């Protein structure tokens, strides 16, 4: 063999080794998934006080002190853990506001006559104190026929909350209920005009939770569906992936369990059946599949809402990098745990549990978000609504979304937004006491998860007029968003 031939073979061998190493090299994680920063928008709003919930306490408060700041290692020092606000569908203008610690309140359209309607703290099985307190009264929904005498849904409302794991038999995952159970209970009253509940309770649904977080969340009926619509009278429920980090049970991609999904049921009893599954649900009839599932592939979809045309918007809290807004589509798979926003996770590229995100492979059968932001901008996406009120014309038709931790508000135009091609977000500017301020600075409280810092603990609510409200746990306040002065 000639010297030239030997050199050629050596060169070929080196190239082969190099290519082999490249083929097996770990993919490069993205250090800044969304480098473009969110700019302040031109819309400025103000806030005005609406109501304040009474002070409550976590059942296992054990205050400590760090750097002179009172904190609590196993509970939140919030005045009241206000979680959700919805209008009653009875034409009264009343609103319902929940405290995660177990109390559902009613108030009139002006925020007055605040009364406790249901108090779950009276129940021995109620379990709001699972560390670090992501459990409690997590969702509620009034049947659209709540105020219609003689209708099947008259006087009925539905409440989702956490209970002790030994308090009943789970419909799903009872053998993995290492932490607690999430339940849906129907409350029925013969006097729906009263501001204090008196009536009966009936359990519909129960699922075991292996960890303390990513439980049941928002529950709602499509408020814009009318009699005769396929959606009318059907209850939507969001379920997180069960908690812990990185979805270790892969519930997001497992249709056999209801975790990591949006569920849809008809909550009215049918004979011995506590509820029924609509025949139009996308996975009905498939063996080994939870038929209640309407959409899946979600991590922690704590909040979702409907626009007036019936479009559902789902806000999904990300793991380490990306927060996202999705359009609700029957049968959709939003990709968690192999997608976080429009990016691949380590589970999709051969480095599971890496905690990083990567450029996504193409093509993809997952339904991508219409809006997203990374953790340079915020840390946990909260509630969101398309604004349909009359008080802020510049905001009309725009989707407004809150970041729970920072308290920043973002908005975008949802019309024409396409899944997988996120639109540009703008920051909504907020005036407090006549000057622009950050909500976390104005209304925040010491952060249980990161002592020494403030946390806005911000959620959003809406009334029957389509006006948006800010819900802050530190002071237990509900504030109406209004036009700036």
Image: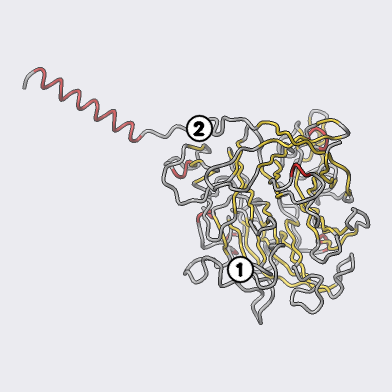
The residue depicted at 80 percent of the width and 38 percent of the height is: 45
How busy is the neighbourhood of tag 1: few (under 14 within 10 Å), some, or many (20 plus)? Answer: few
Across and down, in percent, residue 381 comes to 67, 43
Q: Position of residue 291 (x, y in %)?
A: 55, 68
Query: Nearest the camera: 410 or 351?
Result: 410
Label placed on residue 209: none
Gap in angstroms between the C-alphas marked 2 and 1: 40 Å
Residue 464 is drawn in which quadrant? bottom right
Q: Given this view, does label 2 or label 1 mark the residue nearer the observer? A: 2
Q: Which quarter of the figure has residue 178?
A: bottom right
SS class of the residue under badge 2?
Answer: loop
Q: Mark 1 points at which residue?
A: 171
Q: Measured from the top left, where is residue 376 in percent x and y?
A: 63, 32
Residue 198, horizontal then vertical, whole percent: 86, 71
Q: Residue at x 72, y 53 (%)?
A: 135
Q: Which residue is drawn at 89% across and 53% down?
A: 111
Res. 30 mark: 2
């Amino acid at each position: 063999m000639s010297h030239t031939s030997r050199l050629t073979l050596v060169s070929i061998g080196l190239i082969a080794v190099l290519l082999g190493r490249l083929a097996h090299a770990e993919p490069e994680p993205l250090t800044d998934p969304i480098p473009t920063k969110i700019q302040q928008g031109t819309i400025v709003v103000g806030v005005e006080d609406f109501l304040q919930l009474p002070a409550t306490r976590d059942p296992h408060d054990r205050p400590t002190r760090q750097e002179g700041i009172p904190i609590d290692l196993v509970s939140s020092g919030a005045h009241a853990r206000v979680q959700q606000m919805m209008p009653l569908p009875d034409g009264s203008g009343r609103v319902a506001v929940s405290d995660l610690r177990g109390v559902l309140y009613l108030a009139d359209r002006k925020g007055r006559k605040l009364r406790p309607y249901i108090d779950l703290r009276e129940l021995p099985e109620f379990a709001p104190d699972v560390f670090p307190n992501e459990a409690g009264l997590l969702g509620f929904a009034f049947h659209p026929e709540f105020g219609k005498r003689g209708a099947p849904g008259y006087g009925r409302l539905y409440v989702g909350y956490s209970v002790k794991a030994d308090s009943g038999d789970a419909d799903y995952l009872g053998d993995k209920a290492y932490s607690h159970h999430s339940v849906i209970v129907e409350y029925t009253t013969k006097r729906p005009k009263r501001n204090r509940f008196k009536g009966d309770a009936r359990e519909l649904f129960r699922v075991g939770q292996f960890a303390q977080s990513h439980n049941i969340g928002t529950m709602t009926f499509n408020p814009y569906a009318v009699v005769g619509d396929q959606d009318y009278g059907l209850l939507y429920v969001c379920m997180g992936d069960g908690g812990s980090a990185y979805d270790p049970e892969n519930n997001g991609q497992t249709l056999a369990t209801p975790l990591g999904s949006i569920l849809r049921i008809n909550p009215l009893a049918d004979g011995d059946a506590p509820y029924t599954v609509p025949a139009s649900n996308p996975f009905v009839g498939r063996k080994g599949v939870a038929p209640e599932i309407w959409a899946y592939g979600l991590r922690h979809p704590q909040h979702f809402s409907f626009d007036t045309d019936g479009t559902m918007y789902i806000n999904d809290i990300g793991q380490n990098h990306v927060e996202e807004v999705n359009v609700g589509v029957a049968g959709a798979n939003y990709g968690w745990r192999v997608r976080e926003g429009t990016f691949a996770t380590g589970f999709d590229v051969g480095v599971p549990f890496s905690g990083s995100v990567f450029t996504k492979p193409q093509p993809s059968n997952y339904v991508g978000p219409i809006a997203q932001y990374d953790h340079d901008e915020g840390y946990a996406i909260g509630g969101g609504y398309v604004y349909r009120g009359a008080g802020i014309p510049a905001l009309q038709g725009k989707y407004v979304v809150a970041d729970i931790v920072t308290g920043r508000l973002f908005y975008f135009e949802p019309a024409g937004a396409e899944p997988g091609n996120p639109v540009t977000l703008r920051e909504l500017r907020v005036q407090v006491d006549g000057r622009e301020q950050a909500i976390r600075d104005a209304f925040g409280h010491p952060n249980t998860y990161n002592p020494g810092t403030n946390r806005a603990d911000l959620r959003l609510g809406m009334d029957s007029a389509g006006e948006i409200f800010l819900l802050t746990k530190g002071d237990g306040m509900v504030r109406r968003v209004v036009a700036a002065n």
